[in-house]
Image: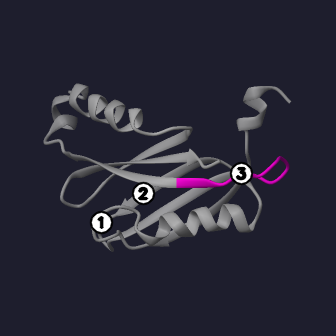
Amino acid sequence: MNEIEKQVHHKFKIFSGSLGKDKSLGPLADEVAHFVVEHRVAAKSIGIEYLESIRRLIITVGYRDDETPYPIKLISVSLGKVGDLVARNEFDQLERAISEASAKLDKIICHELYITDDHEFLMVFMTHES
């Protein structure tokens, strides 16, 4: 199997819960990591949506169960409130914040961004934990 074929996946698990006190994934991060270990899967991707109207996070994890499993960790990093970047289509500040946050981590598999109801940007990195 070549490298890109190892990333292709068709299985998904959904998790849902409240934001942590610091607006991070809170206990959901541990729940996802536990699922990966317990079910002996190789996690490949994450998707995250924050539903402001009900104040709930929805997390999807894409995975494979036909290759060697490995432990993962989900790490939430606040990038701050970035103002009206979307309206102005100016993302340099946000890109710098993402790069700075990722430089502090090892073995990043993938990432996802979500925005809270008070416009705080949070990046979630899925890392390989060896």
Q: The disc labelled 1 sits on which kind of residue? A: Glu
List x then y, in percent, for residue 111.
48, 42
Q: Is residue 47 above or below residue 34?
A: above
> The magenta stretch spans which residues?
64-73
The residue that mark 2 highlights is 49
The percent position of residue 45, horizontal first and vertical second, equals: 60, 46
What amino acid is at disc 2? Glu
Residue beneath label 3, please? 70
Colour scheme = one colour
Q: Residue at point 45% right, 45% down?
A: 112
Q: CA distance from mark 2 to mark 3?
A: 25 Å
Is 124 placed left or right of 15 in the picture?
left
Dominant secondary structure, magenta: loop
Residue 25: where, in percent of width, then height?
A: 41, 63
Q: Which residue is located at x 65 percent, y 51 percent?
A: 62
Residue 3: x, y in percent? 75, 27
Would residue 90 appear left or right of 107 to someone viewing this image?
Answer: left
Q: Residue at x 28, y 35 (%)?
A: 97
Q: Which residue is mark 1?
A: 52
The quarter holding residue 60 reads bottom right
Q: Residues within 10 Å of mark 2 (few under 14, many from 20)?
A: some
Question: Mark 3: which secondary structure?
Answer: loop
Q: CA distance from mark 1 to mark 2?
A: 9 Å
